[in-house]
Image (spheres, rainbow, N blue to C red):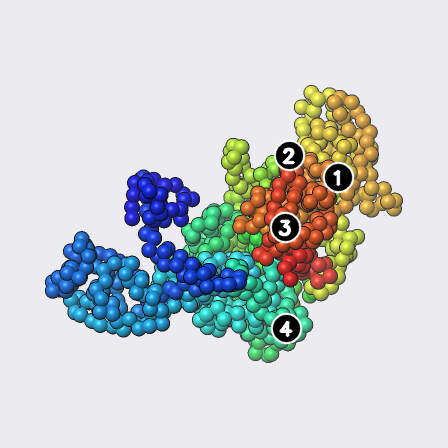
Amino acid sequence: MQAASGTKGGSSGSPVIDWQGRAIALNAGSKSSSASAFFLPLQRVVRALSFLQKSIDSCTDKPKAVHIPRGTLQMTFLHKGFDEIRRLGLRSETEQVVRHASPPGETGMLVVDSVVPNGPADKHLEPGDVLIRVNGTVLTQFLDLENLIDDGVGQIVELEIERGGQPITVSVSVQDLHSITPDHFLEVSGAVIHPLSYQQARNFRFPCGLAYVADPGYMLFRAGVPRHAIIKKVANEDISCLADLISVLSKLSSGARVPLEYMSHTDRHRKKSVLVTIDRHEWYAPPQLYTRNDSSGLWDVKPAIEPAAVLPSVGNNGLPMCQNTTLCHHDTEPIHEVDVRGVTDTVATTEASSGDSSQNDFGSEAKKQRVEDDSSDGTVANGSLYGSELRSDDAMATDNLVLRDYESATALSANASLAERAIEPALVMFEVHVPPSCSLDGVHSQHFFGTGIIIYHSSNMGLAVVDKNTVAISASDVMLSFAAFPVEIPGEVVFLHPVHNYALIAYNPSAMGPASASVIRAAELLPEPALQRGDSVYLVGLSRNLQATSRKSIVTNPCAALNIGSADSPRYRATNMEVIELDTDFGSSFSGALTDEKGRIRAIWGSFSTQVKYSSTSSEDHQFVRGIPIYAISQVLEKIITGGNGPSLLINGVKRPMPLVRILEVELYPTLLSKARSFGLSDEWIQILVKKDPVRRQVLRVKGCLAGSKAENLLEQGDMVLAVNKMPVTCFNDIEAACRTLDSGSHSDENLNLTILRQGQEMELVVGTDKRDGNGTTRTINWCGCVVQDPNPAVRALGFLPEEGHGVYVTRWCHGSPAHRYGLYALQWIVEVNGKKTPDLNAFADATKELEHGQFVRLRTVHLNGKPRVLSLKQDLHYWPTWELMFDPETALWRRNILKALK
C-alpha cells in the first residue's frame, strides 16, 4: 500500500492505524524525493502472531522458542498486467479462465522473475513463465501464494504455467525457509563468514549455502578479498560450504601463506586468486563458531577448531617453529595496490605497466591505501616462502637458474647510473598492514607501503630502515619484497625511534634461500661528512614494479627544520628534526635514499605525514618527502649490532640487547637571531651563536614540554635555549649530542644544565632527561569495545594529562559495542570505574575484572580538552569479553589474554 504521508526514517515497523485506532498495516518505508510512504498489510503478521499466542497458551512453564513455518521455492515472482502477459504469450482462453476465477478488479497475473540455482524450482521454472494454477487453484496474488507455500512445507505442489503460450505442469517440493536461513557463522581474524542466505543467493544468483564473506575482517582484508565474496578454494582444496572451510583452516599453521580462490557477484564469470596469510600474531581470538540459540535469543559461541588441532606457528623463515617439515609450494596471484576511498564498494585496481614507467616512478597516488573490496589480477608469483633448509640438488639448480634469469633480466638496464646499480641490492619495498583490533597510537590507516634500505645483512639477521609513515606502530604485519631477488618474506618491527622519523625492521636471511646470498647486500652508509648546500646527490628508489629508479639532484637546504602540527586524533609527528631539501620536486610519495655518485647512503628519502585543517570541522591527511640524515640511523644501528643498554629482544631466535635513547622531552623550534633580538637576546649571545653556527644563525625556543616528562614545570613556552652544559646550542643535533654525552660519561648524571632566556632574563636550570626504548606501545586492553592504552607521545606532546591518572587513554572504539552505544568514544581518559581510581592499565584491569555480565558501570572520564564527564555503561561479556594484547619480547610475538569473559 502507498500513501502520501511522508514518514521519516526510523519509523519502520510502527503501526498504521485508521480513524478508529485500529492497526491496519505496518510502516515499511518512504520515498525521500516525495511525500510517499509504503505500508505492509497485516495478514502475514496476524499469522505469525497466532502461532505465538498458541505457544503461550499451551506453555505451562517457561516459554520456549516458537517455530513459525515458512516455505520457499527459491524463486521470485512479479505481478504484471494482462497486456504485458499477453505479449509474453498468454493464450486468450487462459486469460478468460483466470479473469473469471479471480476477484473483481484483478489486473494481472504472477510471472516468474528469477530462480535460484540448485533450488527446488531450478530446472523446472524459468523467468517469463506465467503462473496459472497451484494445486488446481488459480492464483494471481502474492498473499494467496505465500499462504499456500507456508502451509505446505515439505510437500509437493503442482504448478500449472504457460511458457511462450505452451501449457506446462511441473511438480516442485516446498523447502523449509528456516533450513536455508543462516543460523551460524564463523568469525576468524575479524572476518564474518556464513552460509549464503536465500536472500543474498537471490540477489547474486548463487546457490544457497556457499561460504559467503559478510565482512572480510583483517586476514581477508589484507589479502584483498572483498565483502560479499564467495570462497571457492583455500590451500587448493574445494570449499562448498562453511564446514569445508573450517576443516581446511584446522590444517593450517599460524603464519602460513596459502592461495585462496573466490568469486564476486560483480565479476561472477571469473574466479580470482589471492594469497592469504594466516595470522602469526594473536591479533584476534582463535576461529570461533557462533550458533543462534532461539531459546535464549543469543548467539552461542564455541571454538571452531579444537585447540589440539591447531598447528604450530610458522616463523619468519616460513617453517613451523618446532619442526622442519616442508610445506607445499603454490602458484598464486599477488595482490597489487587497490585504492578504496572510504568504506564503499568502489574499487580501483593498479597493475604494473610494461611500458613507460615514469608515472609509476614519481607520479604515484597517495601512499596510504585502504584495501576493502577487491584485488587486481596480477602476474603469477611462486610462493616459495615455505622451502626447507634441507634442499635437494634439483631445488638448488632451480634456484640458480632463477637467479641467472633474474640477473640477466636486471642487467638489461644499461642506462642505470653507477649509484643506482650500487644501491639496487639494498632496496626493499615494504607493504604494511595494521590490524583494526590494535590500531594504536592514533594510526590513521590500515595499509601502508614505501621503499626501505637494507643497512645490515648477515647470515642470521637482516635490518632494513624505512620511514615511520610506512611503519607507524610495532603492532603491524610487515612484508618485504626485494629489488635484487624475487622473493617476499615477513619482517618484524624491532625499533621505532621515539623522535626521528625512521623504523628498523628485522628479517630472516635464511628465509630467502641460499641463491639470494650473492645478490642481496647491505648498503654502505656515509654519515660523515654531512651534506652541504650545493652538494650533488642521487635519489634512488623503487617503482611499483620493483624497478630501481634514480634521479640526480642538488641539495638546496641540508638543515630545514620541520614544523608539523598535531592531528585531530594525535599520532606520531616528526618533531625536533632537521631534514634535507632538494631542488627538484619528485612527488609526495616516492621514497628511497640519497646517495653519492658511488651509491653510498647519505640520507634516506622518507615520507612524513601531516594533517591540513581547512576549518574547525574539516581536515585532510597529506604527506611530503624529505631527506633524513643517515648519522641518526647509524648510531642506533651500531648499538644494535654491538649490544645496546636496554632490555633484550628476540630477533630470529637470538636475544639481542636493544638500545635506549636518551632524549630531552621538550618540543623545540628555531627562531632567527634577527627576531630573537626583539625578544631580548643580547648582542653578546648573538655573537656567540653566530660564531657557533654561521650557517643557521638561529636560536632554539621551547614550543612545549611533553606532559609527564622531567622537563615539565621547569621549561616554559617561549624560553630560548642558549647553551647546554655551558656549550652554545643552535640546532636539534646539539641537544641530542649533549644527551648522548650523559650516557657515554662515567657518572650517572641524567640532568642537563641549561642556560635559557625567559622574558629577557638569563637563567640557569637543571633539567632531567628521559630514556626511551624503541618498542612503541606494547600493551592494550579492549573493554566493552573500547581500546585503551598508555597515552602515546603525540598525546603527551599536547601538554595535558589528567591529575587523577593518565594511564588509561581511549584510542579507539568499535561499532556496535557498549562503548559505542553509551558514548564512550576516543580521545579521553578513564580515570574512575565505579569510584575506583584507574591511574594505569593494571589498576584498570583489576577494576574491570570485578564487574559482572550485564552490570551497569559508572565511569568518570576526562576529555583531551580537559573537560570531565560521568557516564554509565552496561557491560556485555557475551559478545564483548575483556581482553588484552601484549608484546612478548621473549618470543617476539603479540599475545592475547582473556581478562574477563562468561564461563
- Which is more foreground, mark 1 or mark 4? 4
Mark pair 4, 2: CA separation: 50 Å
User: Who comes first in sequence, dot 2 or dot 3?
Assistant: 3
- Rendered residue at 75%/52% (across/down): 659
- Rendered residue at 69%/64% (across/down): 652
- Which is more foreground, mark 2 or mark 1? 2
Q: Dot 3 lies on which element? A: loop
Q: Is residue 171 above or below residue 861?
A: below
Q: Amino acid at mark 1?
A: Ser
- Rendered residue at 46%/60% (across/down): 56
Mark pair 3, 4: CA separation: 35 Å
Of residue 562 and residue 527, the one placed in the foreground of this image is: 562
Residue for badge 4: 308
Q: Residue 608 shows which numbered tag?
A: none
Q: How many other residues sit within 10 Å of disc 4, few (<14), some (14-19) or many (≥20)?
A: few
Residue 480 makes an appearance in the image: no
- Rendered residue at 56%/50% (across/down): 817
Residue for badge 2: 867
Q: Amino acid at mark 4?
A: Ala
Task: Determine the image quadrant of residue 760.
Answer: top right
Residue for badge 1: 709
Residue for badge 3: 855
